[in-house]
Image (spheres, rainbow, N blue to C red):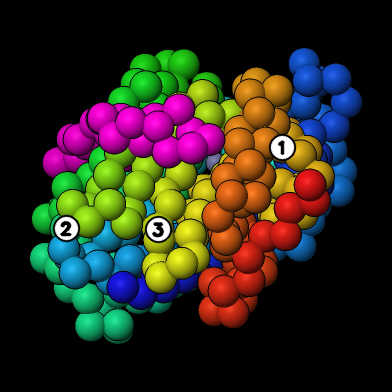
């Protein structure tokens, strides 16, 4: 089994999004009106070459983000607080093809959550089973979904995700899990916080666990420091999740791979595990 990092461009966000600023109730305001931007960060998706078929975790973003009118014009976050840079050749489908992985080879796609930089490449997977935690999918719907920044109007017409059923029991310290593969070496665990139904995927290769973390934090440093980002609706829940991940990493050698950490790809390659202070 092999895990590949696929970088689908970069995104610029505010410093106050990477690290929530001020009292929790002011986090979003400070994201919108903060003046400092961070250097562009990568948008990673992950490809697992598994003997039961290719599994993709998140789909990255699309070059369509540069089309005028792709984002709702009235939306303050898209107007003030984010800039995407994705070339057509950086979209996940194009990169998979280059690796010799065709549309039909991808059996399963798992979304950590449905923000646009994770769901923007969905159109590349018309033949796959796509799994989402249903409460997350429900959040994307209706007017409130639009206000929360989800772009459900951009999902492919055929998109009808399968629910993630957490029927795999506890996977310590996570209270529940779902085994994606019969062998039990790929599991989905709840990592609520960045969104209320956010999930992560844990892949065991030999004796190392690779934690495909989505946006549980924007970097390994922020996990170790347990700092919530500026867009989590419940920052305390996000911090509880980080503690769970740290507890996991103190039990098992764990390579922590968040979507936007510029060092994720290097850690994957070098199998650099988290060192948790006891
Ligand atoms: Zn996100």
Q: Is residue 74 above or below residue 172?
A: above
Disc ID at residue 203: 3
Element class at badge 3:
strand
Quadrant including the N terminus? bottom left
Q: Is residue 21 above or below residue 2?
A: above
State if disc 3 and disc 2 touch (CB < 8 Å). no
Element class at badge 1:
loop
Mark 1 and mark 3 lie on one chain; the one further toward the N terminus is: 3
The answer to whether any part of residue 276 appears in the image is yes
Element class at badge 2:
strand
The residue singled out by tag 1 in the image is 229
State if disc 2 and disc 1 touch (CB < 8 Å). no
Q: Nearer the viewer, mark 2 or mark 3?
A: 3
Write down the quadrant of residue 96 in the picture: bottom left
Residue at position x 51%, y 24% from top? Answer: 196
State if disc 3 and disc 1 touch (CB < 8 Å). no
- Ligand 1 within 8 angstroms of badge 1 C-beta: no
Q: Nearer the viewer, mark 1 or mark 3?
A: 3
* Stretch of the chain drawn in magenta: 150-177
Residue at position x 57%, y 45% from top? Answer: 248
Write down the quadrant of residue 49 in the picture: bottom left
Could you give the CA–CA distance between mark 1 and mark 3, rounded to whole angstroms?
Answer: 25 Å
Residue at position x 53%, y 29% from top? Answer: 192
- Residue 23 relative to residue 143: left or right: right
Could you give the CA–CA distance between mark 1 and mark 2, rounded to whole angstroms?
Answer: 33 Å
The residue singled out by tag 2 in the image is 107
Residue at position x 16%, y 58% from top? Answer: 107
Q: Is residue 36 above or below residue 16?
A: below
Dominant SS type (magenta): loop
Write down the quadrant of residue 178 in the picture: top left
Q: Position of residue 24 (x, y in %)?
A: 78, 20
């Amino acid at each position: 089994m092999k895990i590949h990092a696929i970088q689908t461009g970069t995104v610029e966000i505010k410093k106050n999004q990477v690290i929530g600023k001020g009292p929790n109730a002011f986090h979003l305001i400070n994201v919108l009106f903060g003046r400092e931007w961070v250097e562009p960060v990568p948008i990673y998706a992950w490809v697992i070459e598994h003997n039961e078929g290719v599994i993709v975790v998140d789909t990255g973003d699309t070059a369509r983000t540069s089309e005028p009118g792709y984002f709702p014009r009235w939306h303050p976050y898209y107007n003030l607080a984010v800039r995407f840079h994705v070339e057509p050749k950086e979209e996940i489908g194009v990169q998979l093809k280059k690796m010799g992985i065709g549309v039909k080879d991808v059996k399963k796609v798992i979304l950590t959550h449905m923000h646009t930089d994770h769901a923007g490449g969905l159109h590349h997977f018309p033949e796959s089973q796509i799994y989402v935690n249903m409460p997350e999918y429900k959040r994307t719907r209706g007017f409130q979904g639009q206000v929360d920044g989800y772009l459900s109007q951009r999902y492919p017409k055929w998109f009808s995700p399968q629910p993630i059923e957490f029927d795999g029991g506890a996977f310590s310290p996570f209270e529940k899990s779902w085994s994606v593969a019969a062998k039990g070496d790929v599991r989905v665990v709840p990592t609520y916080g960045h969104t209320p139904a956010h999930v992560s995927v844990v892949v065991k290769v030999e004796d190392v666990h690779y934690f495909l973390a989505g946006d549980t934090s924007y970097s390994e440093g922020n996990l170790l420091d347990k700092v919530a980002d500026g867009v989590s609706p419940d920052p305390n829940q996000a911090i509880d999740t980080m503690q769970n991940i740290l507890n996991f990493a103190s039990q098992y050698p764990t390579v922590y791979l968040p979507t936007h950490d510029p060092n994720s790809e290097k850690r994957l390659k070098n199998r650099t595990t988290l060192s948790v202070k006891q």
